[in-house]
Amino acid sequence: MRVRKFLLLLLLLLLSSGEANSASWVNFPTSWDIGQAFAVSISSTAEYSNPVVTWMNRSITLNVEQGGAGRISYGLLGSDVRNTKPGNYTILFEFVQGGKKYKASGNITLKAREYPFENLRVSPKMVNPPKKELPRIREEQKLVGAALRTMTPLRLWTTPPQPPLSTMTLTSHYGFRRVYNGVPRNGHNGADLRAANGTDVLAPFAGTVVLTGFHYYAGGSLYIDSGNGVITVFFHLSNILVKKGDKISKGQVVAKSGSTGRVTGPHLHYSLVLGGQFVDPIPLLSTSITQMLKLGTQSQVNNL
């Protein structure tokens, strides 16, 4: 019995010693372009829990994995070209270690990026909808808002993403400032890809379907949650092959492209939402989370 108590005491001492000598870091860029995705991380040599990063007034829950110098939490963040102004923005990291809550904050300077205008001709009702359609549009906005607030801690996304089409040809870039029938509207919050009606649409990440529907402006729409605030969005689909609650694997055929909603012709609209911010989805297709973190600055938590 005495030997067992001694061994237990020794184990507790070793654990407490490990926590006392542990080191923890956060990684984030100090400067970035508006509309572009960036990577962040929390890492430590010792166990920790409840990692959260707060950015653009949204708290993003992360999960803890083995990696780095011991344990690591990965995050993808960004800013929406539609409503973000250049300037300095605060980012806050929080986690619990050894019964103590740690906080570390920093600043990211968001820089303007010039996006050109794009003139489009669409059906007049898609610029000024009939009054009878307004209740439908408001209800769809509520459903979309709820879907985009989905926050699950388990990371199902892996980088680089699976391209959503077997052949990727951009027809309209993210950020284009659109003018419909001579009327200015918000910047384009996704990328348009050339796709004939009925083309297979592939899931960029594993995840869970959180919303499907045929909406007034977006037409056939699909929203897939991949954890940590990472949500994939597809618009103008002709056919949706999955339903809310379905578990999706990376590369799975989830829909068929089409020309539904406000369109000038058949194509696929592809959006990536990170912590509620619509970002340019295309650059992420050719990089990874580890490559993106190399562009950031790593700082020890106690030194911030």
Image: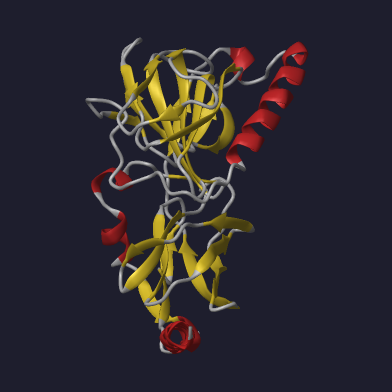
**In this figure, which colouring scheme has been used for the structure?**
secondary structure
Where is residue 301 shown, x and y percent of the image? 47, 81
Residue at point 45% right, 17% down? 237
The structure residue drawn at horizontal position 42% and vertical position 79%, both measured from the top left corner, is 24
Q: Position of residue 148 (x, y in %)?
A: 59, 39
Residue at 31% across, 41% down:
161
Position of residue 261 measured from the top left corner of the image (x, y, whole percent):
53, 16
Q: Count of labels shown?
A: 0
Which picture quadrant has residue 18?
Answer: bottom left
In the rendered image, the vertical position of residue 144 relative to residue 286, given as above or below: above
Within the image, what quadrant is residue 142 found in? top right
Q: Is residue 5 above or below residue 268?
A: below
Q: Give how far across and how far down residue 176 sits, in percent.
A: 44, 38
Q: Nearer the viewer, residue 129 or 166?
A: 166
Judge from the rendering whether residue 213 lies leftward or rightward of residue 72; answer left or right.
right
* 189 over 220 or under it: above or below: below
In this view, the residue in front, 98 or 269, is 98
Which is nearer the eye, 91 or 63?
63
Q: Is residue 212 left or right of residue 237?
A: right
Q: Residue at the far front: name it.
A: 1
